[in-house]
Image: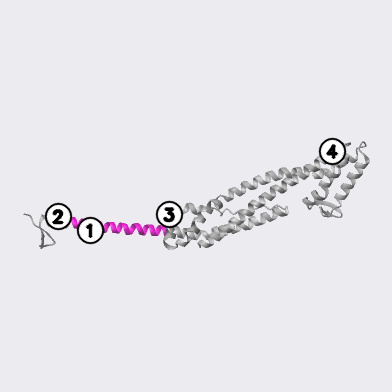
Amino acid sequence: MNTYYVFFKNWDFNLDQWTIFVGIATIIIGLVGFSIAFILYFKQRRDAAQDSFDLFINSLPNLNVAVKETINNLQEFVSSLQSGDFANPVIPTSLNNNIIDKINLIDLKRYFAKNDSSKIPVLEKFLIDSDFFGTYLNYFTNELIFFRQRYLDKEQIYSNWRLLHSNVFFSSITDENEDDRYKDFYSNWVQELNQDKEIFNFIDDRPTSLKNRKLLIEKHILPLAHQIFPFIEKSEKANNVNLLANQVNSAYLDMDSITSKLIEVFTKDIRKFKDISTNIENLL
C-alpha cells in the first residue's frame, strides 16, 4: 500500500487518511475564502453607505440655501401681487432634486438604519418632498405664464375705463341730439373723476397716472353704471356707457379673483417650503 507524507516522513498518511485530510483542508480553505468574501462584501456595503451619506449630507446645505431663497422670492412676489405692483419672481436653478439621482437610496437608508435610525422618518419625508421641489421651477414658470395671459386679457378690458372720460365722453357731449341733463350728469362725473387725488397721481394739478384701481371702481365706475340708468331709455350712448362701465367692473373682479387665487396658491407653497427647510435642517 502506498504511503504519503506531508513535509516529513514521520507525518505519513495512508490513502484514506490523506483523503480525509484533503477534504478537511478543502472545507477550511472554503470557509476562510467565504469569510474573507463575506467580510469584503460587508465592508463594501458599509463604504457604499458611508459614501452615499457623505454625498447626501454635503449637498443639503446648498439645497437649503436654494429653498430659503425661494421662500424669500415667493414672499416678495406675493407682496407685489397684493399691492398690484407685480414683481418679476426668480426661482433659483439650484432648487432641484438632482441629489436623488446621484446617490443610491438603498445605501443611504442602510446608513441611517445602522447609525441614526431616529432620522429615518425625516429622510422619508425629505424623499417625498423632493418630488415637490424637484419640479417646482417648471411648475412655477407654467403657472406664472398662465396667470399673466389670463390677467393681461382682463386688464385690457379693464383699461377701457379710460374711454369713459375721453372718447366715449366727448362723443356724448358733442352730440346735439343728446339730452342736456345727460350731458350735465356725465360732465360732472368726468370732472369729479379727474380731480380725485385718491385715484390719480398728479403733476401740476393734472392727473398723470392711475394710483388705485379698487377705488376707481368703487368711487366712480360703479356709481356711473348705476346713476346713468335714468338716461338709458332715451339715449343709446348712455346705454353704451352703462355697458362699458359694467364690463370694466367685471374685468376688475376677474383680475382680483385671478390674483387672489394665485396668492393663495403661492402662500401654501411658502408654507410647504418652510416645512422642507425645517426638515432639511433636522437631517443635518
* Magenta stretch prevailing secondary structure: helix
Q: Do the residues labelled 2 and 3 touch (CB within 8 Å)?
A: no
- Residue carrying label 1: 28
- Check disc 3 and give the amino acid type: Ile
Q: Earlier in the sequence, mark 3 or mark 1?
A: 1
Q: What residue type is labelled 2?
A: Thr
Query: Does the CB distance between marks 3 and 1 fall below 8 Å?
Result: no
On the picture, is 247 further left or further right than 32?
A: right
Assess whether residue 40 is covered by the magenta stretch: yes
Q: Nearer the viewer, mark 4 or mark 2?
A: 4
Tell me the CA gap for discs 3 and 1: 34 Å
Residue 104 in view, yes or no: no
Tell me, for residue 45, which label it has, or none: none
10 Å crowding of disc 4: few (<14), some (14-19), many (20+):
some
> 10 Å neighbourhood of mark 2: few (<14), some, or many (≥20)?
few
CB within 8 Å, label 4 to label 1: no
Q: Which of marks 4 and 1 is in front?
A: 4
Identify the residue shown where x is 49% and y is 58%. 121
Which residue does the numbered mark 4 point to in the structure image? 239
Quarter of the image containing the N terminus? bottom left
Residue 55 is one of the magenta-drawn residues: no
* CA gap, disc 4 and disc 2: 116 Å
The scheme the figure's colours follow is one colour
The residue labelled by disc 2 is 19
Tell me the element at label 3. helix
Q: Earlier in the sequence, mark 2 or mark 3?
A: 2
